[in-house]
Amino acid sequence: MTVYMRFVLSICFLGALALPVAHADESSPATSVQVTITEVKVRISDRGAVVLLLAEGKAIPVFVDLTVALSIQGALNGETLSRPLSHDLMRTILEAYGGKVLRTVITLKGGTYYGALTVAVQDQVKTFDSRSSDSIALAVHFKAPIIVGRDLLESAGRSVEKSKTEDL
């Protein structure tokens, strides 16, 4: 990656830090019908790195830091980086102990996205609170379902037909 590209990506990342919190309504899949995300895309917008969670013709934009974006994009492309990122390390550790990610549920509370990452290791299944970006990254690494509440998809999702990545 050239110095110029790193500079541009850094500026995009810093711009994302200045964004206001999400304007969607509070959401909890426990009180909503659940929707499984059908596609995940990573884009660089004028506001920074963004993960798009797509389902039913809508995209939920989740702004992430550049390292998480690289991890998710690498997992989507089946690429292995020369040095493992945190999500690669976690995948390796889980797999070494016979573990796997079963699913993640993304919610919105107080303008912040949260992840509930469900992991199975041997005969134990546990759910862990996590940043939504880390939860999404690990789900993508394990090809596990990403789930949101229908109310979150309706309130935070943007129509794919009407919206472009740079508008997100």
Image: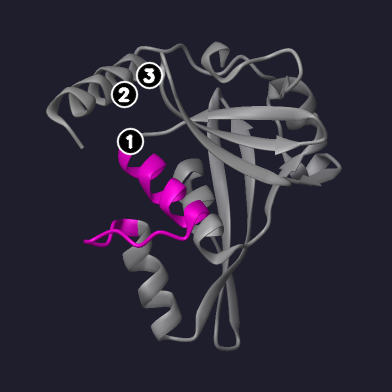
- Residue ID at (39%, 84%): 96
Amino acid type at mark 1 = Leu
Tags 2 and 1 touching, CB below 8 Å: yes
Q: Is residue 138 above or below residue 123?
A: above
Mark 2 residue type: Phe
Cα–Cα span, label 3 and label 1:
10 Å
Apparent side of residue 92 relative to residue 151 in the rendered image (left or right): left
Which secondary structure class fits the magenta region best?
helix
Task: Name the side, left or right, on which 123 lies relative to 4.
Answer: right
Q: Which residue is labeled 1 in the image?
A: 66
Front residue (pair 146, 164) = 164
Q: Secondary structure at mark 3?
A: helix
Q: At x 62% / y 16%, what residue is drawn?
A: 164
- Residue at x 44% of width, y 80% of height: 95
Q: Quadrant of the N terminus?
A: top left
Q: Which residue is mark 2?
A: 13
Q: Position of residue 80 (x, y in %)?
A: 35, 62
Q: Are marks 3 and 2 in contact (CB under 8 Å)?
A: yes
Tell me where residue 165 sits by quadrant: top right
Q: Residue at x 74, y 12 (%)?
A: 162
Q: Spatial distance from mark 2 to mark 1, Cα to Cα?
A: 7 Å
Q: Magenta part of the protein: which range? A: 66-86
**Outermost residue toward the right?**
33
The mark found on residue 16 in the picture is 3
x and y, in percent, of residue 29 in the image: 75, 43
